Amino acid sequence: MRVLGVDPGLTRCGVGVVEGVAGRPLTMLGVGVVRTPADAELGHRLVAIERGIEEWLDEHRPEYVAVERVFAQHNVRTVMGTAQASAVAMLCASRRGIPVALHTPSEVKAAVTGSGRADKAQVGAMVTRLLRLDAPPKPADAADALALAICHIWRAPAVNRLQQAHAAAAARTPRVPRTAAAPVRKVPR
């Protein structure tokens, strides 16, 4: 399975490609950051992110794209920029018919480090170890993108099995058509 992980952001959008299957050693195929100038107009920044992600999709041809799920923060401006960059990544993948998975930061941290409360240094250290790298990818956005890809590779088989089991159970359960309720009769005493 080849996964492009995207750690969305307007100034730095981390991207990383990992290939492998759960239970086997993983291979990093590429890592980087799509950057935009903070003083540029928002529309131009989003176009730059789109072009950068399109280049990664063209070069690496992933089977899946894993994007960090946007979560509420105190800084509305930051969360809006993250959400906009996230939407661009999902649009680029969906336009090509590539399935998109969203993972929360705590899901990614738990998958990679064993703790949903791990800090960036711990995530970077585990990404380095899991992918057998010489040093943690810099900046942290790049390491986070690789962690997203790793998380998806490890979680996707279990999620797929759950979805298949749910679909199979739904197919086996006969659907009872809805009818009007039968009138209640009073029994004389």
Image: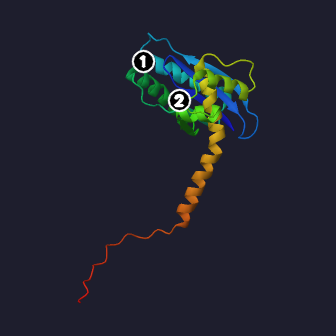
Say few, some or many: other residues with alpha carbon within 10 Å of mark 2 (under 14 / 14 to 19 / 20 or more). many
**What's the amino acid at mark 2?**
Ala
Q: Secondary structure at mark 2?
A: helix
Quadrant (top left, top right, bottom left, bottom right) of the C terminus: bottom left
Which residue does the image show at 26% across and 87% down from the upper left?
187
Whether 51 is drawn above or below 26: the answer is: above
Name the image quarter holding residue 169: bottom right
Is residue 132 toward the left or the right of residue 80 in the image?
right
From this viewpoint, is residue 56 visible?
A: no
Please provide percent x and percent y for residue 102: 53, 36
Query: Quick one: 2 or 131, which is closer to the camera?
Result: 131
How many numbered marks does the figure carry? Answer: 2
**What's the amino acid at mark 1?**
Leu
Please provide percent x and percent y for residue 49: 52, 21
Which residue does the image show at 50% across and 22% down from the upper left?
9
Q: Residue furthest top?
A: 39
Is residue 85 toward the left or the right of residue 141 in the image?
left
Say few, some or many: other residues with alpha carbon within 10 Å of mark 1 (under 14 / 14 to 19 / 20 or more). some
Q: Earlier in the sequence, mark 1 or mark 2?
A: 1
Whether 16 is drawn above or below 165: the answer is: above
Please provide percent x and percent y for residue 160: 61, 48
Q: What whole-number distance in Å separates the C-alpha atoms at marks 1 and 2? A: 16 Å
Which residue does the image show at 59% across and 33% down from the upper left?
115
From this viewpoint, is residue 46 visible?
A: yes
Name the image quarter holding residue 66: top right
Which residue does the image show at 65% across and 33% down from the upper left?
150
Residue with the mark numbered 1: 42
Residue with the mark numbered 2: 89
